[in-house]
Amino acid sequence: MKVLQLVTGANDSFYSHQIRALEANGIQCTTLTPPGSHRHENTGGSRSVINYLRYLPRVRRESSGSYDLLHANYGLTAPFALVQSQLPVVLSLWGSDLFGPYGWLSKLCARWCDAVIVMSTAMADELDQDCYVVPHGVDTEQFRPIPQPDAQAAVGWDPTHLHVFFPYSPSHTVKNYPRAKRVVDAARDRLNQPITLHTVSGEPHTRMPLYMNAADVLLVTSHWEGSPNSVKEALACNLPIVAVDVGDIRDRITGVSPSYVGATDTELVNGLVNVLANPRESNGRHAAHAVSRSQMGDRLQQVYETVLSTSHVSSSNIYQTPPPR
């Protein structure tokens, strides 16, 4: 099977994992990105309208090659996938492309695709059409438990402090750093212990397991999410999680202890205090196996095969037979 992949950022870690999982299953993938620079994972980056207009003829030209289907990754690539009538179109929505300012575009394009993949049931409910729920997979060999003293020495964290990990840039508005800081400040006041809130961005993804294992807890305060990779990576490292109830987080950490989901600042502070008052590993690794990279590859392959066996591509690319959610 040969698949043309459209994506805004080919070097984003979760997309790279996806391609490796598909290639491990014998699927040949060719990646096509828009011209210009790509700034953040899960965003359109800093590309201009001109960059995207230049993308249009490239997609049409490449799609006329010997591919079996086209997979549009992230909502901003969907219009370009649909301008061609050669190949059936699978669309993956990642979270911000559905809940963010361009959600209307993703929803419009999704109606015309042969199959739609989302990261969580919350996204499926928001999309309000038949789709497949296939979360991004995590590499459970890369993300694994490491002795905390070794990890803290590797990243240079003070072993006499408690460490809260917020694996995003404070400038990434959707991740809501002000709330994370507010919650940690309140927990510090209650515990009367040195607690450091660490933000990490721009680091090689290969170093993330070190940070996960150096920390005492992962804190997620995002306004919205699809299926955040940081949560699944924390599970694979047995790192406790305190998070707001967005995306599929509640489902991911059900049965994982210690970990907490909270709606209010008070609930988040209570969860953080409960974890930090007695720092310990969670039992999360067993839950991470359900969202491993290999399982993701298998499920994506099943979607591709279903589309190829049922889709009759017309000049309008109208979706004929909805898949089960």
Image (cartoon, rainbow, N blue to C red):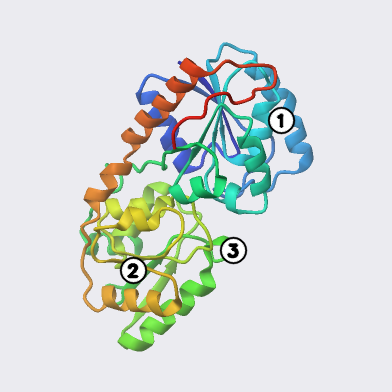
**Image position, residue 78 (x, y; %):** 64, 34
Q: Earlier in the sequence, mark 3 or mark 1?
A: 1
Residue that badge 1 annotates: 55
**Badge 2 amino acid:** Trp
Identity of the residue drawn at 62% across and 44% down: 38
Determine the residue positioned at 55% across, 50% down. 126
Q: CA distance from mark 2 to mark 3?
A: 26 Å
Q: Amino acid at mark 1?
A: Tyr
Q: Which labelled disc corresponds to residue 157?
A: 2
Residue for badge 3: 173
In front here: 316 or 76? 316
Q: Residue at x 60, y 47 (%)?
A: 97
Q: Quadrant of the N terminus?
A: top left
Q: Say if 303 sits above or below 108 in the image.
A: above
Q: Earlier in the sequence, mark 2 or mark 3?
A: 2
In the displayed structure, 114 sits above or below 277; it is above
Task: From the viewer's perspective, tell me whether residue 253 is left or right of residue 174.
Answer: left
In the image, residue 10 lies at what x, y percent?
Answer: 54, 36
Of residues 108 and 85, the one nearer the viewer is: 108
